[in-house]
């Protein structure tokens, strides 16, 4: 345990740099006894002899004193850096945001959102973690993340606050050579006899199953995957249709197949992209700035990836 103080180290450094206690006291604008007592205390605590005392020539550093001065100088520089960073934190010009992102939203929004924030707040580090819907909610409540880019469904909302960023309507995805692919939109009842490719992500399955149930159809599930791209590849390969809310910009799938995305004629419940936080938690200027930035970022998107 360190028992000496930064003040004692500062006085020691002043004595070494100015060549004596009287000179250091004048430079520091304090009394000579205060400087002398600090030096005596520092030597007593450390067990070092920092100066040789000369009646005629004042004080000169010992070998121990010269080495210790190097350490004290680095310590003082670090202390000044800590003070500068503390001032920046107090002014909320610097800091860290722990951002959780729902895994299907991440490839569409996270990188651009974080990169754009870095341009306006270079002193703030955003550390991103991809998580499931339920894990995001739990992490917010536990305080292990500060904010979550997520949907407003799929997890218990108790204890959470939400800022709406975008409203996404689900879409039908068909193989490009499907007989109905030439249409611009489809009524889901037209697909009642078709097989269904299920995106089995946490929260996603219940949402899509609920939509199908509301329309009154219960299609045979022919293929299941937790990967959005695997689902699109299965659709292109002829396993059936699927419902998605996130739309990659290309109709080409990873394995070279092609799909067609169509609007749904039926009235269906949308999904809302939100920035979630723990209700009642201290937000601070940095988190408020990020939330305001997220609202502007999504508003500026001409057509959110939906």
Image (cartoon, rainbow, N blue to C red):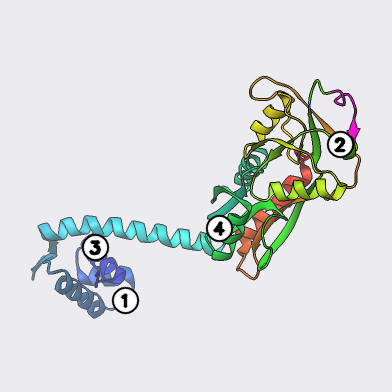
In the image: residue 68, left or right of residue 93:
left
Residue 58 seen in the current view? no
User: What element does badge 4 sit on?
Assistant: loop
- State whether residue 94 is above or below residue 15: above
Residue 179 seen in the current view? yes
**Disc 3 marks which residue?**
18
Q: Residue at x 73, y 39 (%)?
A: 246
The quadrant holding residue 36 is: bottom left
Q: Residue at x 55, y 58 (%)?
A: 145
The quadrant holding residue 57 is: bottom left
**Disc 4 marks which residue?**
145
Range covered by the magenta-colored residues: 179-186
Q: CA distance from mark 2 to mark 3?
A: 80 Å
Task: Determine if the magenta segment contains residue 97.
Answer: no
Residue 208, x across and y down, in percent? 76, 46
**Disc 1 marks which residue?**
30
User: What element does badge 1 sit on?
Assistant: loop
Q: CA distance from mark 1 to mark 3?
A: 14 Å
Residue 255, x across and y down, in percent? 64, 22
Q: CA distance from mark 1 to mark 4?
A: 47 Å
In the image: residue 48, left or right of residue 251:
left
Q: Say which of 84 and 254 sits in front.
A: 254
**Disc 2 marks which residue?**
263
Residue 54, x across and y down, in percent? 8, 68
């Amino acid at each position: 345990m360190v028992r000496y103080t930064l003040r004692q180290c500062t006085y020691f450094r002043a004595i070494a740099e100015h060549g004596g206690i009287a000179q250091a006291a004048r430079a520091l604008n304090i009394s000579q006894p205060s400087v002398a007592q600090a030096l005596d205390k520092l030597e007593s605590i450390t067990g070092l002899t920092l100066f040789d005392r000369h009646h005629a020539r004042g004080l000169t550093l010992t070998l121990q004193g010269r080495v210790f001065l190097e350490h004290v100088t680095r310590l003082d520089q670090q202390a000044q850096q800590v003070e500068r960073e503390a001032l920046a934190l107090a002014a909320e010009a610097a800091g860290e945001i722990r951002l959780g992102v729902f895994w299907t939203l991440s490839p569409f929004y996270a990188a651009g959102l974080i990169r754009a924030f870095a341009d306006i707040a270079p002193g703030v580090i955003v550390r991103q973690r991809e998580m499931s819907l339920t894990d995001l909610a739990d992490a917010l409540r536990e305080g292990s993340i500060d904010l979550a880019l997520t949907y407003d469904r799929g997890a218990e909302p108790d204890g959470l606050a939400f800022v709406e960023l975008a409203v996404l309507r689900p879409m039908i995805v068909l193989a490009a050579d499907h007989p109905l692919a030439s249409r611009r939109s489809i009524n889901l009842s037209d697909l009642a006899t078709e097989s269904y490719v299920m995106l089995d992500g946490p929260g996603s399955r219940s949402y899509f199953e609920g939509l199908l149930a509301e329309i009154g159809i219960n299609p045979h599930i022919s293929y299941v995957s937790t990967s959005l791209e695997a689902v699109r590849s299965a659709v292109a390969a002829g396993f059936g249709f699927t419902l998605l809310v996130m739309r990659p910009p290309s109709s080409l799938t990873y394995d070279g197949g092609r799909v067609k995305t169509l609007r749904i004629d039926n009235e269906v419940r949308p999904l809302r992209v939100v920035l979630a936080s723990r209700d009642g938690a201290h937000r601070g200027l940095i988190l408020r700035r990020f939330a305001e930035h997220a609202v502007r970022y999504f508003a500026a998107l001409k057509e959110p990836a939906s």
